[in-house]
Image: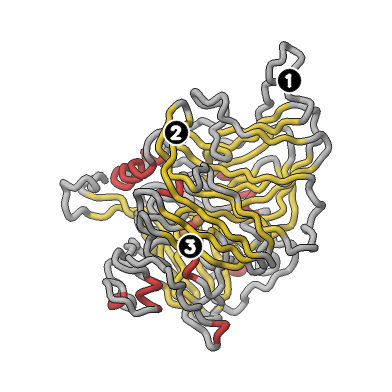
Amino acid sequence: AAIHYHEFVIEAKPVKRLCRTHSTITVNGQYPGPTLEVRDGDTLVIKAINKARYNVTLHWHGVRQLRNPWADGPEYVTQCPIQPGRSYTYQFTIQNQEGTLWWHAHSKWLRATVYGALIIYPKLGSPYPFPMPKREMPVILGEWWDRNPLDVLKLALFAGGAPNVSDAYTINGQPGDLYRCSSKETAIYPVEAGETILLRIINSALNQELYFGVANHKLTVVAVDASYTKPFTTNVIMIAPGQTTDVLLTADQPPARYYIAAHAYNTANAPFDNTTTTAILEYESAHYSAKGGKYLKPIFPQLPGFNDTATATAFTAQLRSPCKVKVPIEIDESLFFTVGLGLINCKNKNSPRCQGPNGTRFAASINNVSFVFPRSTSLMQAYYQGQPGNVSRGLWQPVKGTKLAKLKFGSKVQIVFQDTSIVTVEDHPMHIHGYDFYVVGSGFGNFDPKNDPAKFNLVDPPLRNTIGTPPGGWVAIRFVADNPGIWLLHCHLDTHLPWGLATALLVENGVGKLQTVQPPPLDLPQC
Ligand code: C2O
């Protein structure tokens, strides 16, 4: 296994999109940031150097980080942020994971521009469980704002849903040529007639589930969240923020230019943004039309409507593990988490935060606790190093809503997420750090503990790290709590996270060295 050393310099650089140039937080001057390519079993050593004006942390979304929460990254959970002028080296090993993951900033809304792909190839000499594609490339879906995303965040937090509609969706950082002033800002995917390519699709958008398709081409889904699936063919995929989906595409159409496109799904509460981000699948030899060397106009795909819940549900329901898997059957810990948006009475009605109806502000919660991140230490440091601060004394009697769910090492866990939003109905993509989990069932309406479990798929459910709680519905997951540490569990819609739609799993140490959290690295940032 190899060791990969990287330096990630986080700094502001001018980036031009939609005819305007912004100072944008980048990694090594790149937006999106660098693609990391490793094999299963390899170690990554990434020195993050903060040359920006903001506190920052980096998170390796979906990496299990076994016994190594110190490298996980969510600010104030596993580490204090890296302050401007400081650095921190993330060191971790990929253990039994293959496919597509990604990395992103995990502090404020910096992940709007600080993100990139993390590609994990099989160990040297092991093949993919599908025919070797001729080429492969990341397709990172994102969002772009004409304003500083941190200012947009402030507005969104105070005023509710409206400002979270971005000025463009993007593919690999490019809006595509359907937006104003963006004719040159289009990612091109070259392909030769007849060959099969692997697209590694990542939804890094802050707040939007997306439909994705390629004109006239079928997509064969082979993996989600770095776990292989039973292959199936589809015209369109639905992907929620945080999720990844690997698809094979065979260039079996007449040589031409075809749009690769994504647009919003489930914008129930936001003004519908009907613009679509595009890239171009370009057959070699099809660059130019006969007419005067002009680029051929690409063919456009049919995507479902933004409120087409049936297609999204049907797509998600088709995902299966490739064969029979070991799902926990007898459950030791059964957790029921209501997740939802709500309104909290303002203490100070004149505060700019107080923009909800009748003197309220917007909030989100799990089991009616709106999560409050500590400020003077991280939860990990408070727990494992007994550091003073407002957390250590309150860890067992939660202080100000910093409420953790405590789990014994090795326990078999079931969590049912139930959407109870009273403000609007939304799909909450729930993500757990440090774990993959089996998605054993889901449905609309209220979870029925008597009858629904009988319908669970305990044979070949998909293994994921992020799953949508259907709007007004529920989803059930199962996993073994085999990774000790404190692991953030949250909605991957980035307005909902600061509103408090989060908790953390405190998985206690087991017995013996291999079941306990490793000691923290010496350069762990202090608050
Ligand atoms: Cu991709 Cu806690 O995040």
Which residue has dot 2 on it?
167
Query: Quarter holding the N terminus?
Result: bottom right
Which mark identifies residue 288?
1
Of the residues shown, which amino acid type is indicated by label 3? Phe
Q: Residue at horizontal 59%, vertical 31%?
A: 186
Mark 2: amino acid: Asp
**123, above or below 167, in the image:** below
- Give the residue displayed 30% in from the left and 64% down from the top: 375
> Residue 370 at what x, y percent from top left?
33, 61
Q: Which mark is residue 417?
A: 3
Tag 1's secondary structure?
Answer: loop
The answer to which of 503 and 319 lies nearer the viewer is 503
Question: Which residue is depicted at the point 66% across and 58% down?
Answer: 38
Q: Residues within 10 Å of mark 2 (few under 14, many from 20)?
A: some
The quadrant of the picture occupied by the C terminus is bottom left
- Other-residue count near label 1 (Cα within 10 Å), few / some / many at <14 / 14–19 / ≥20: some
| Up/down of 167 relative to 50, above or below | above
Give whichever of discs 2 and 3 has the lower sequence position. 2
Q: Nearer the viewer, mark 2 or mark 3?
A: 2
Mark nearest the camera among 1 and 2 is 1
Type of the residue with mark 1: Tyr
